[in-house]
Image (cartoon, rainbow, N blue to C red):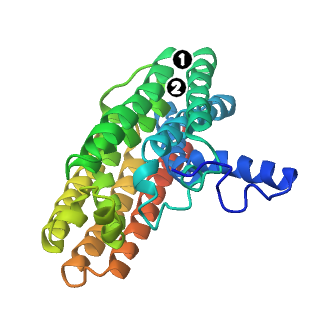
Amino acid sequence: MSSIAGAPGVQSAPPLDLAMRRVKGYVALTKPRIIELLLITTVPTMFVAAKHLPSFGLIVLTLIGGSLAAGGANAMNMVYDRDIDALMERTKHRPLVTGLISPRSALIFAIGLEVAAFVELWLTVNLLSAVLAVSATAFYVFIYTMWLKRSTTQNIVIGGAAGAVPVLVGWSSVTGRVDVAPIILFAIVFFWTPPHFWALAVRYRDDYRSANVPMLPAVADLDSVVKQIIWYTVALDLLVLSFGFVAPYARVEKIVYFVIALVLGGAFLFKSMSLRKDASPKNAMSLFTFSITYLTVLFVAMGLIAAIQHP
C-alpha cells in the first residue's frame, strides 16, 4: 500500500496545494454522492411523517447527523477495502489507494464523524434517531464490508439494509417512533438496492473479478442476473404500491400517489426487462442511471404530496 510520501505528486506539491488536496481527499472518503442519495430519501420521509411540513430546524439537524453518520461509514468502508480498491479501475484513484491520506488518519476521521453524528442527533433530535443512524454504520461496516462483500453473492442484498435505515431515521426524527409506514419505506429502499447496484456491477464485472469480490454479475451468467433484477423490481413495485395504503394521505392525495407509483414502477420494470434483449454494459448503466432518477422522483413525490395536503 502506498504511503503519503510515495504518492505521485504529493511529496513535491506546495504546502497549500497539498493541504487542499488532503481536504478534498477527506471529503472523498465520505462518498458525497452516496450521501446525497441517502438524504433524498430522508427529507421526504420527514414530510410524510409530519403529514405536512416538519420544522425546518429539525430537517437541518437531522440532515447534519445523517450526513455525519453516512460519511463516517463510507470512510470506514474505504479503510477496510483499500486493498481491493487498488485493483479496480473504478476505485484506484481513491485517497487511501494513492496514499494521499493514511489509513490511520482516515480511521480516526471516520470514528470522529460517527461520534459527532451520535451526539448531535441525540442532543438535538432524539436518542432513537441517533441509535438508528449509528447502527446502520455498524451494519454496513461489520456485516457488509468486513463479512458479506467478500464472501457471498448476496452481499449487496443483505448489505442494502444499511442504506435503507435513513428513512427510519427521518421518520423517527419527527415522530420519535418507528411503525408500519416507515418499515415499508425501509423495504422499498432495501428491494431497490439490488437492481440498482447489480446494474452498475454489470458494467464493472471485470473489476470485481480482478478484485475477487463475488458480486453477482461477476460470478453468474448475465441471464440469471437479469432474472434477479426483474424479480426484485417486481417486488419493489408491489411494495411501493402497498405504501399508498398505509401512507397518511387524504383520499385525493392517495390517488395521486398511486398514479405516480404505477407510472414509475412501470418504467422501472420496462427498463429492467430491456436487459433481457440487451444486457450490454451501456444498457445496464442506463438502468443504473434511471434507478437513481426513479428513487429520487418517487421520494420527492411522496414529500410533495404530504406538503400540499392540509395539516
With respect to residue 74, does 181 lie above or below?
A: above
The foreground one among 290 and 149 is 149
* Side (left or right) of 139 relative to 22: left
Residue type marked 1? Asn
Q: Are marks 2 and 1 in contact (CB under 8 Å)?
A: yes
- Quarter placement of the C terminus: top right
**What residue is drawn where x is 74% and y is 54%?**
21
The furthest residue to the bottom: 277
Residue 4, horizontal then vertical, whole percent: 66, 49
Residue where numbered disc 1 is placed: 126
Residue 198 in which image quadrant: bottom left
Residue 61, horizontal then vertical, whole percent: 64, 29
Residue 53 in which image quadrant: top right
Task: Assign a secondary structure to mark 1.
Answer: loop
Camera sees residue 123: yes
Number of numbered discs visible in the structure rendering: 2
* Side (left or right) of 268 relative to 167: left
Q: Mark 2 or mark 1: which comes first in sequence? A: 1
Find the distance from the CA under tag 2 to the CA under tag 1.
7 Å
With respect to residue 133, does 40 lie above or below?
A: below
The foreground one among 298 and 250 is 298
With respect to residue 129, does 239 lie above or below?
A: below
Residue where numbered disc 2 is placed: 173
**What residue is drawn where x is 25% and y is 79%?**
279
Tag 1: Cα neighbours inside 10 Å, few (<14), some, or many (≥20)? many
